[in-house]
């Protein structure tokens, strides 16, 4: 730990000195972005080591490192640099999604599919109802709802409830990988989170269509947003299946420099997804599911092969996410954000227990599973961005309020989940399973 603190201090001193020679904003083609990437990578890895020695998630260390170094605090990494590093985000999301899909074997999950479906559906339904109700009751404290009719407030509250109910496959997989967890509890939680988030995407499509019909969109037209979202979803699924075929062919026929090839696929998904309005997370998730469940290739083995190479990308990804946590936004909506975060956590825990009872989940598993639903990250942030983009007047302010709650869940959720996994007895099993093979 002492060594990590000293290395982090040296990196901070060097970046502070180097930043003084750079303009405030820099572009991807300049030296600023390269400097930012190097600093974020080194500082995040050392911060992760420090947090791990304190028995906290490395992921939380990455987030805090980005937040402190970002525009909200010391501004070592400027807003322009954060934007330039979004490319790393796309690759990291692809790797996370591919790994998540590769870990999910429908054959292994079959005995737990009842638990996954019951916990996921009940917890998400209760979360949407409770968060929407809280937003409606707090509407008098939300300036963007001033002057709205009761029905309009209901529609806005419902849309906000759907967005804030999103879970986080990215954080879940990152914590599972960090703790080396393997077993029925980890697999059940991962299945719940992924399937629940797929349900949230479709539910958001419905809520978005309702809000379009009531308010209209920035671009006009009430149905365009829904159609665009459907193309986005099913187009991503189709492309993901094709990517699965490409990966299967490469792994069977060539099988050289596998990590590099996978990184290239994820980079292609990130770049093409941006231009074709497809979702890199969904594409890579489907590709991983295809490999694990429709071919003779073991997705879990692929995940193990690229795990060590993925760590630096994950460190930068979550550090950049931390740099995007703006204190000036959070402090304006802090009270409402805290209330919504608390309501969400309570609703998800209650929903999880009801779902586990219906799904006949073993008693010990019930003590661990609810903690896997608290974290939030990319999906919720992406839905907030869509909300701000689609609805003039109230969309941007509603998204700001929701992002405050997401920030809280982003920081607290990983800590709770990691501690729960350490109590589960499954931490460290992945290495033992890999050694046995």
Image (tube, rainbow, N blue to C red):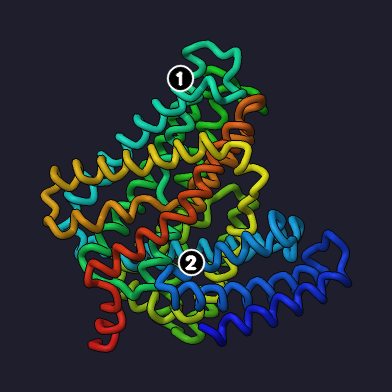
Residue at x 73%, y 64% (from the top left corner): 77
48 sits left or right of 305 in the view: right
Marked residue nearer the N-terminal end (2 or 1): 2
Mark 2 Cα-neighbour bin, 10 Å: few <14, some 14–19, many ≥20: many
How many labels, in total?
A: 2
Mark 1 Cα-neighbour bin, 10 Å: few <14, some 14–19, many ≥20: some
Q: Are marks 2 and 1 in contact (CB under 8 Å)?
A: no
Q: Which mark is residue 188?
A: none
Would residue 181 be seen by someone viewing this image from the given angle?
A: yes
For this rendering, which residue is in front, 42 or 378?
42
Dividing the picture into quadrants, the one containing residue 217 is: top right
Q: Secondary structure beneath disc 1? A: helix
Residue at x 61%, y 23% (from the top left corner): 143
Query: What x and y, as percent, mark residue 212?
Result: 54, 23
Looking at the image, residue 8 lies above or below residue 71: below
Can you name the residue that lies furthest to the front here?
A: 2
28 sits left or right of 382 in the view: right
Q: Secondary structure beneath disc 2? A: helix
For this rendering, which residue is in front, 230 or 159?
159
Query: What x and y, as percent, mark residue 427?
Result: 29, 74
Residue on which disc 1 sits: 154
Looking at the image, residue 220 lies above or below residue 417: above
Query: What x and y, as percent, mark residue 211?
Result: 51, 24
Residue on which disc 2 sits: 59
Query: What x and y, as percent, mark residue 138?
Result: 48, 25
Residue at x 25%, y 55% (from the top left corner): 369
For the residues carrying marks 2 and 1, which lies nearer the camera in this image?
2
Residue at x 28%, y 45% (from the top left corner): 349
Q: CA distance from mark 2 to mark 1?
A: 36 Å
């Amino acid at each position: 730990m002492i060594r990590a603190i000293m290395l982090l201090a040296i990196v901070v001193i060097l970046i502070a000195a180097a930043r003084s020679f750079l303009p405030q904003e820099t572009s991807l083609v300049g030296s600023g972005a390269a400097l930012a990437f190097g600093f974020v990578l080194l500082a995040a890895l050392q911060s992760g080591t420090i947090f791990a020695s304190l028995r906290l998630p490395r992921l939380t260390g990455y987030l805090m490192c980005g937040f402190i170094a970002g525009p909200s605090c010391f501004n070592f990494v400027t807003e322009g640099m954060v934007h330039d590093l979004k490319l790393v985000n796309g690759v990291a999301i692809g790797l996370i999604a591919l790994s998540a899909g590769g870990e999910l074997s429908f054959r292994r999950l079959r005995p737990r599919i009842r638990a996954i479906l019951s916990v996921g559906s009940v917890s998400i339904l209760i979360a949407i109802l409770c968060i929407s109700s809280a937003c409606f009751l707090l509407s008098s404290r939300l300036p963007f709802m001033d002057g709205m009719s009761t029905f309009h407030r209901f529609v806005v509250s419902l849309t906000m409830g759907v967005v804030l109910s999103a879970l986080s496959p990215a954080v879940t997989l990152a914590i599972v990988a960090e703790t080396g967890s393997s077993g029925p509890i980890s697999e059940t939680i991962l299945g719940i989170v992924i399937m629940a988030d797929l349900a949230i995407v479709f539910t958001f499509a419905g809520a978005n269509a309702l809000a379009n019909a009531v308010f209209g969109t920035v671009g006009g037209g009430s149905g365009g947003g829904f159609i665009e979202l459907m193309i986005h979803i099913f187009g991503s699924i189709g492309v993901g299946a094709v990517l699965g075929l490409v990966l299967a062919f490469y792994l069977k026929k060539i099988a050289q420099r596998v990590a590099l090839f996978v990184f290239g696929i994820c980079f292609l998904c990130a770049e093409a997804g941006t231009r074709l309005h497809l979702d890199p997370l969904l594409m890579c998730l489907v590709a991983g599911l295809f490999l694990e469940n429709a071919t003779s290739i073991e997705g879990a083995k692929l995940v193990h092969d690229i795990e060590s190479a993925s760590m630096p990308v994950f460190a930068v990804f979550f550090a950049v996410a931390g740099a995007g946590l703006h204190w000036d936004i959070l402090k304006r909506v802090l009270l409402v954000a805290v209330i919504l975060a608390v309501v969400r956590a309570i609703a998800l825990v209650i929903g999880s227990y009801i779902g586990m009872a219906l799904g006949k989940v073993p008693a010990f598993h019930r003590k661990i599973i609810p903690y896997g639903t608290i974290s939030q990250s990319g999906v919720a942030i992406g839905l907030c961005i869509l909300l701000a983009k689609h609805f003039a007047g109230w969309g941007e302010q509603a998204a700001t309020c929701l992002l405050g709650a997401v920030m809280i869940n982003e920081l607290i959720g990983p800590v709770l989940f990691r501690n729960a996994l350490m109590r589960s007895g499954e931490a460290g099993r992945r290495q033992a399973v890999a050694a046995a093979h």
